[in-house]
Amino acid sequence: RAAGAAQAAAAARHLGDPRPDVRAAAAAALRALGGHAAPHAAKATEGLRDPEPGVRAGAARALGAMGGLSSEHARSLERLFREEVGSAHLQAASVREAAFAALPDLGAEGAARALRLVGDADAAVRRAALFALGRLGEGRPGWGRGPEEWLRRLEVLARGGTFRQGPGLAH
């Protein structure tokens, strides 16, 4: 446990490195450390504003791996998703998908924000969220098949519910 905390502290320091490849590697390390990196969530949140798309996506994935963080972290991920909808850079879809996938991992608040994106009044946001939902559902074991099951799962999570392993097993 102490080793994980020390590794997380070292990785968090590297998020401020001037080289984008080092910042991206630091974000990946924080993701791999999961809950051990939670004390450095504020630093990872700063990574969501990085000029490099790969670092932004990595920071989003790191926040998701840290688990149930504050509603401020969920707000930051939602903001990143919305900003990337209007972005023209080649990695915009990857950044959006990373932000969207991290939201349900933050608990009920994050799942509720993901649902809001799916039902957003802005057609571009809604379309991007539905695409990201499809990628999320296809990539997670136990999420079931198809958009209806994926939306149902988000709704259960938004109410604070959980799922056991296996498709469609809510409790």
Image: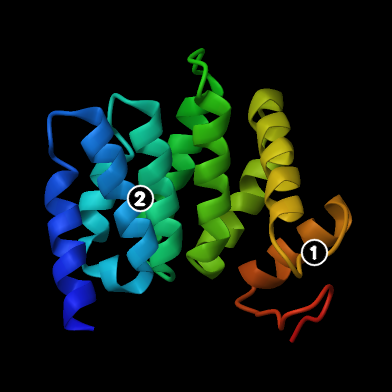
Does residue 148 lie above or below 34 as drawn?
A: above
Disc 1, SS: helix
Residue 80 placement (x, y as % from top left): 43, 36
Point out the image quarter for the N terminus: bottom left
Name which residue lies at 42% across and 47% down. 60
Does residue 164 lie above or below 149 as drawn?
A: below
Residue 138 placement (x, y as % from top left): 76, 52
What's under tag 2, amino acid-wise? Ala
Quarter residue 160 falls in = bottom right
Does residue 75 lie above or below 90 as drawn?
A: below
Using a 10 Å C-alpha cutoff, classify the residue at mark 2 as few (fewer than 14 neighbours), some (14 to 19) or many (20 or more): some
Point out the image quarter for the C terminus: bottom right
* Residue 119 visible in the snapshot: no
Name which residue lies at 58% across and 40% down. 97
Mark nearest the camera among 2 and 1 is 2
Task: Return the mark for residue 152.
Answer: 1
Using a 10 Å C-alpha cutoff, classify the residue at mark 1 as few (fewer than 14 neighbours), some (14 to 19) or many (20 or more): some
Task: Return the mark for residue 28.
Answer: 2
Does residue 154 lie above or below 22 as drawn?
A: below
Residue 71 placement (x, y as % from top left): 40, 61
In the figure, is residue 98 to the left or right of 143? left
Q: Of the residues under marks 2 and 1, which one precedes in the sequence?
A: 2
Name which residue lies at 61% across and 51% down. 114
Q: Outermost residue, bottom direction?
A: 171
Q: How is the image coloured?
A: rainbow
* Residue 27 visible in the snapshot: yes
Name which residue lies at 81% across and 81% down. 169
In the figure, is residue 157 to the left or right of 51? right
Q: Outermost residue, top direction?
A: 88
What's under tag 1, amino acid-wise? Arg
Residue 110 placement (x, y as % from top left): 52, 59
